[in-house]
Amino acid sequence: MSDRELIKQKKEALIEITDGFADRYLDEDYKMLCQKLIDKMSRKRQVPFLSGKPEIWAAAVVYALGQINFLFDKNFEPYVSTTDLCNYFKTSQSTTSQKAKIIRDMFKMRYFDEEFSTERMQKENPLNEFVMIDGLIVPVSAVMKTLDEKEAQLQKELGLEDEYLEAKEK
């Protein structure tokens, strides 16, 4: 069996295992993120899941995604405890956590990660309300207010103030 065939076979097995967990405890968003992460892992030069038990890697994938998306926080939905996750995959929490850290480090996964955050986390990201301008972090509302003021001033200078005000009212 070639390396590509082995990688494909193990990747499909991991996806099947994580799909089962997602169907039982999570949602479609997590299911798709698990598949995306496993697929990305399979394209690494050194594919991490070629060695070790597939259940450990499957648990680590869910664990890594869960950590950055607050899966283990009871205030968020869906919620799963780390104990329930590890019991489902029949893995130890320390081993699962160690493998999850490898995955998070490998892909530089952080809270509110653009690539691996759930849709809900992307929408609720508190940093969405800020932009960086010349190295300074400012609220978007302040930028918009300044732009509106500058536009109004320009319209006034061009003698188009009445048209501008009419357009703003619409």
Image (tube, rainbow, N blue to C red):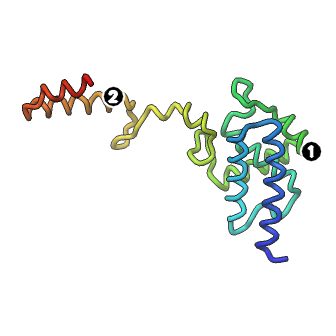
At a point 62% along the width and 42% down the height, the residue shown is: 117
Q: Nearer the viewer, residue 19 or 68?
A: 19
Secondary structure state at the residue bearing disc 1? loop
Percent position (x, y) of residue 135?
37, 42
Percent position (x, y) of residue 70?
69, 33
Do the CB atoms of the residues marked 2 and 1 lie less than 8 Å apart? Answer: no
Q: On the image, which quarter does residue 136 sit in?
A: top left
Location of mark 1 (residue): 90
Would residue 143 appear left or right of 7 to someone viewing this image?
left
Image quadrant where one finds the C terminus: top left
Percent position (x, y) of residue 59?
82, 47
At a point 11% along the width and 31% down the height, the residue shown is: 160
Number of other residues with Cα within 10 Å of mark 1, as a class: few under 14, some 14 to 19, many 20 or more: few
Secondary structure state at the residue bearing disc 2? helix
At a point 74% along the width and 64% down the height, the residue shown is: 47
At a point 80% along the width and 72% down the height, the residue shown is: 5
Would residue 151 appear left or right of 117 to someone viewing this image?
left
Location of mark 2 (residue): 142
Query: Given the image, on which type of amino acid does mark 2 rest?
Result: Ala
**Which numbered circle lies on residue 43?**
none
Query: Given the image, on which type of amino acid does mark 1 rest?
Result: Lys
Image quadrant where one finds the N terminus: bottom right
